[in-house]
Image (cartoon, rainbow, N blue to C red):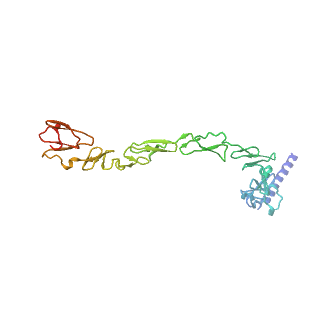
């Protein structure tokens, strides 16, 4: 029992001694942190953004000096470095080097082996590279040209153009065609109003003819113009012969003689001079080339004449020239 009492006494003495030492060591030790017992050693546990044995230095990694790598404050790695030399170290990502990991190791791409705007991708593990080719170029160094228009499907006279940023082509259509391959013809006879409704290109019942690159309107009289929108007086073209008068009738016209003329063609009217002498008689002009039979009671003769008088008291079939 004496031995056990001795051991207990020693243990109590050591514990009390450590607590006293720990308290003395932590006094005014941590400026921006908490003092903790780390395996019997008084150690500062720094607050966020502070480093150093006394937590008296702002973390140099806050400014992110390592461009392509992880940043570590030196004080966390080497406790013995004096406070005035506290800084940081960069652990660079693969392919980068330099104090701040801001230098890229081009490796095999340093000689620019990719042609025709190809992009070189360095294989850092094998010190090799491969090329990402653009447009119509292929091959290890993008040196082989491929004509993607050689077997193109462009139709109706369209022009094929290789796409500069892809392995494809496009068709430039001529007027009157559309579609991916210019395979569709544009119907110029179809138009749309502001509400998306189909309207007729040719106005006033005109007939539209769709051409390869445009249209033609076949207008009905009296309409004219590119889309039959202009009213045209049928008499404006002077369809009647000289000496006659043109009269508009609906959408057409008729020709009539000027005063003092009659017939087709118009000729002087012999009745203007009142050749029928007997009062009450009526003069009827005869067109040139007609040969009426002049019948007088007691005789029948055929005489060319330009008019006939219808006399009062005489049957119309017995007309004469002078009654």
Where is residue 249 drawn, in percent x and y?
Answer: 30, 45
Q: Nearer the viewer, residue 33 or 117?
A: 117
The image quarter containing residue 22 is bottom right
Q: Residue at x 44, y 44 (%)?
A: 217
Where is residue 269 drawn, in percent x and y?
Answer: 24, 47
Q: Is residue 260 visible?
A: yes
Q: Is residue 200 visible?
A: no
Q: Residue at x 34, y 49 (%)?
A: 235
| Apparent side of residue 202 relative to residue 15 in the rendered image (left or right) | left
Q: Nearer the viewer, residue 124 or 66?
A: 124
Q: Nearer the viewer, residue 320 or 62?
A: 320
Q: Nearer the viewer, residue 98 or 315?
A: 315
The image quarter containing residue 153 is top right
Q: Is residue 158 above or below residue 22?
A: above
The extreme bottom residue here reads 84
Where is residue 121 drawn, in percent x and y?
Answer: 75, 48
Where is residue 48 drawn, in percent x and y?
Answer: 71, 56
Q: Residue at x 42, y 44 (%)?
A: 202
Quadrant placement of the C terminus: top left
Quadrant placement of the N terminus: top right
| Apparent side of residue 151 relative to residue 53 in the rendered image (left or right) | left
The extreme right residue here reads 3
Please count the marks in the image: 0
Q: Residue at x 85, y 51 (%)?
A: 10
| Apparent side of residue 305 relative to residue 234 in the rendered image (left or right) | left
């Amino acid at each position: 029992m004496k031995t056990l009492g001795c051991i207990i006494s020693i243990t109590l003495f050591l514990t009390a001694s450590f607590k006293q030492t720990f308290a003395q060591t932590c006094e005014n030790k941590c400026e921006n942190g908490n003092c903790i017992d780390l395996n019997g050693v008084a150690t500062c546990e720094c607050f966020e953004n502070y480093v150093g044995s006394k937590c008296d230095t702002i973390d140099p990694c806050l400014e992110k000096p390592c461009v392509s790598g992880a940043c570590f404050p030196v004080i966390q790695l080497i406790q013995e470095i004096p406070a005035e030399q506290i800084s940081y170290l960069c652990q660079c990502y693969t392919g980068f080097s330099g104090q701040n990991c801001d230098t890229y190791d081009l490796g095999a791409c340093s000689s620019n082996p990719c042609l025709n705007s190809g992009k070189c991708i360095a294989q850092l593990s094998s010190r090799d590279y491969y090329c990402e080719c653009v447009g119509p170029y292929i091959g290890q160094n993008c040196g082989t040209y491929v004509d993607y228009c050689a077997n193109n499907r462009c139709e109706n006279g369209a022009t094929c153009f290789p796409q500069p940023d892809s392995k494809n082509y496009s068709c430039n259509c001529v007027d009157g065609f559309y579609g991916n391959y210019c395979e569709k013809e544009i119907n110029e006879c179809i138009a749309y109003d502001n509400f998306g409704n189909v309207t007729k290109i040719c106005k006033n019942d005109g007939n539209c003819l769709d051409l390869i690159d445009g249209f033609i309107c076949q207008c009905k009289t009296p309409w004219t113009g590119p889309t039959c929108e202009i009213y045209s007086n049928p008499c404006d073209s002077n369809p009647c012969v000289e000496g006659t008068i043109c009269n508009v009738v609906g959408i057409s016209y008729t020709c009539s003689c000027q005063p003092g003329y009659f017939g087709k063609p118009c000729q002087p009217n012999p009745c203007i001079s009142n050749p029928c002498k007997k009062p009450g008689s009526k003069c009827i002009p005869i067109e040139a080339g007609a040969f009426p039979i002049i019948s007088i009671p007691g005789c029948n003769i055929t005489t060319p004449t330009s008019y006939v008088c219808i006399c009062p008291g005489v049957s119309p079939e017995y007309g004469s020239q002078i009654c």
